Structure formats: structure tokens, C-alpha cells
Image (cartoon, rainbow, N blue to C red):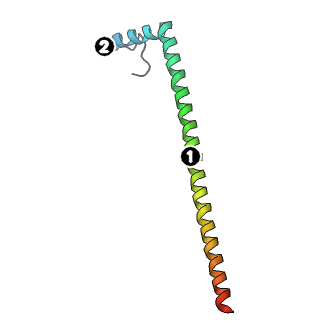
Amino acid sequence: MEQTTETNAVNPDLKEMHDMVTHVKNNKEVTLAFMKIFEKEQLLIQEGIQQGIQQGHDDMKKEVEKERQRAEAAEAEVQKLREELARLGK
């Protein structure tokens, strides 16, 4: 049951489970520990997201540089072919 209460905990197992959950919810130390763990998890998630974004940027920079070099090589080849064509045409 999602919303167990004293009144709808109809069998001993549900009653025991409800009592344990109620005890944990009312325990300030458990609540504080949960909040600390939750906070740490959120920080780790954010760090992971930032690392992923940075990795994506780094990968993109590498790809752009590789493509720039390929374009420069192609331009140099075209220039050589133009020069060869001009030489042959004279």
C-alpha cells in the first residue's frame, strides 16, 4: 500500500511495516542522515553532469580541429592541382 495508516494496516505485517516507517520518519537523526546523503548525491549528480558537458566540449573541439586540418589539406591539394593545371596549360 502506498498510503498506509494505522487504520488501513489490516494485517500484522503491514502494521509492523507501518510502525517501522513511522519510527524512521520521526527519528531526527535518520532524517538528518537522509538529508545529508541526498545532498551529497545531488552534488555528485551535478559534478557528473558538468564533467559530461566538459567532456562533450573537449570532444567537439578535437573534432573541429581535425576537420579544420582536413579542410586545410584539401585546400592545399586544390591549390597544387590549380598550379599544375596552369603549368600544363601554358
Residue 10 falls in image quadrant: top left
Q: State the CA–CA distance, disc 1 to disc 2.
A: 50 Å
- Residue 39 in the figure: left or right of residue 6: right
**Residue marked by disc 1:** 56
Please state which of residues 50 and 26 is positioned toward the viewer in this rendering. 50
Left or right side of 32 for 23: left
Above or below, comparing residue 61 to residue 74 in the picture: above
Name the residue that disc number 2 marks.
13
Amino acid type of the residue that numbered disc 1 sits on in the rendered structure? Gly
Q: Amino acid at mark 2?
A: Asp
**With respect to residue 60, does 12 lie above or below?**
above
Query: Do the CB atoms of the residues marked 1 and 2 lie less than 8 Å apart?
Result: no
Q: Work out whether 73 lies above or below 82.
A: above
> What percent of the width, then of the height, locates residue 44?
52, 28
Residue located farthest toward the bottom when viewing the structure as drawn: 90
Q: Nearer the viewer, residue 33 or 14?
A: 33
Quadrant containing the C terminus is bottom right
Residue located at (64% from left, 90% from top): 88
Residue found at the very far left of the displayed protein: 12
> Is tag 1's residue or tag 2's residue first in the polypeptide sequence?
2
At x 60%, y 51%, the residue is 61
**Residue at coordinates 64% horizontally, 71% vertically from top-left?**
75
